[in-house]
Amino acid sequence: MKKLFIFSLASATIVLASCGTGSQPPATGADTATTNTVPVTLPDPAAFHDSVDGQPTALYILKNKQISAAITNYGARVVSLLVPDQKGTPTDVVLGYDSIGKYIHQPDTYFGAVVGRYGNRIAKGRFKLDGKQYTLATNNAPNHLHGGNKGFDAVVWTGKQLSDTSLELTYLSKDGEEGYPGNLRVTVIYTLDSDALHVGYAATTDKPTVLNLTNHSYFNLNGQGSGTINNHVLQIFADRYTPVDSTLIPTGKIDSVGGTPFDFRQATAIGARVGDTGNIQIKYGKGYDHNFVLDPAPPVAGALSPRPAAIVRGDLSGIVLSITTDQPGIQFYGGNFLNGTNPLKAGKKDDYRSAFCLETQHYPDSPNEPSFPSTVLKPGEKYATWTYFRLSTK
Ligand code: GAL
């Protein structure tokens, strides 16, 4: 688990963003980036003491020399992630709220959450497993999204702080919850490891089911609420991606990124090609909202094979996020649905394209696409996956 791949952006070609924010008019203030001027701190845990569905909510703090994290058991959400920028100034690189009430009342963004049972979309809210048809909520009409009306992002997990740097969150998703079969016992462990946040996922079921867990943190490496991410420089280790239809369901084809705005094999500014609305995929996604097929993992004897997934650099902060995972795909979502209406921590706003998500996962709609890697979990099997988010200024 500790094997890390470290890549440098130094040798890569950097294509600078020349266009603004793309096809849609940005919300006020969204097309510029600013640095933080007020000291950044973690939210007050007292603002997270409440109860949802009779279960107590809380905020847990993890700290080591380099990183401080605040995580709530409501939706297993990363609320804050503080890391030093290139000048050593603490910078909160994830979008979030400063109280539990805001998470409960602004539910649709999935800020920082563990999404499940199925991260991303299942076409028309239907899938067949062992000959039986299952029907799910079409909460993102006409499709099912991120586990349904009340996915894992909107339930209270049982929290157990394991140490100053580690938090265990468990949840029992009952047979039939949101239409999915099987009692599913899920454990997520967040651990700070030197300059990284490690997220480990484990699950077992008592009936065959489908499962695709991911973390839905929204990053702005210049600091949450500091404007556009279009000048962040991104590299994705993927030769291929899964094109979608107009409702964001993969067509089943796996296409080369070559010659398209989806080619991030060389480090490129996020906004450099996002305005290319002549590209039908950019049009369907309203920008970037696509699953990339990560390049095959190098074999590692006797261990899960880690794969380098993506590296992003904040243009103003110099903070570099590098992601490694054992998952086969990564959903790159460029914050196209953000519109400045959600009140972030420290009085900031979640403007249009002021954050990105890189969700390590299986491909969307895999339960209906036999050619994609399977997301079926059977009784007796152990689901175990992980993702490393490394944050540095190198
Ligand atoms: C992403 C998804 C987007 C959007 C977003 C939440 O994972 O790909 O289409 O639903 O979550 O607003």
Image: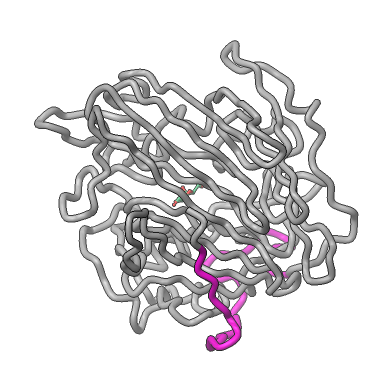
Question: Which quarter of the figure has residue 36?
Answer: bottom right
Nearer-the-camera pick, 271 or 292 = 292
Relative to 205, residue 297 above or below: below
Which stretch is magenta? 4-32
Specify the principal SS of the magenta part. Answer: loop
Question: Which quarter of the figure has residue 282?
Answer: bottom left
> From the viewer's perspective, is 13 left or right of 206?
right
- At x 56%, y 43%, the residue is 109
> From the viewer's perspective, is 160 left or right of 80?
left
User: Is residue 334 visible to the viewer in this orientation of the structure?
Assistant: yes
- At x 73%, y 52%, the residue is 67
* Residue 106 located within the stretch drawn in magenta: no
Residue 351 percent across, percent down from the top left: 67, 56
Nearer-the-camera pick, 164 or 279 = 164
Q: How was the colour assigned to the protein in this rendering?
A: one colour
- At x 22%, y 54%, the residue is 372
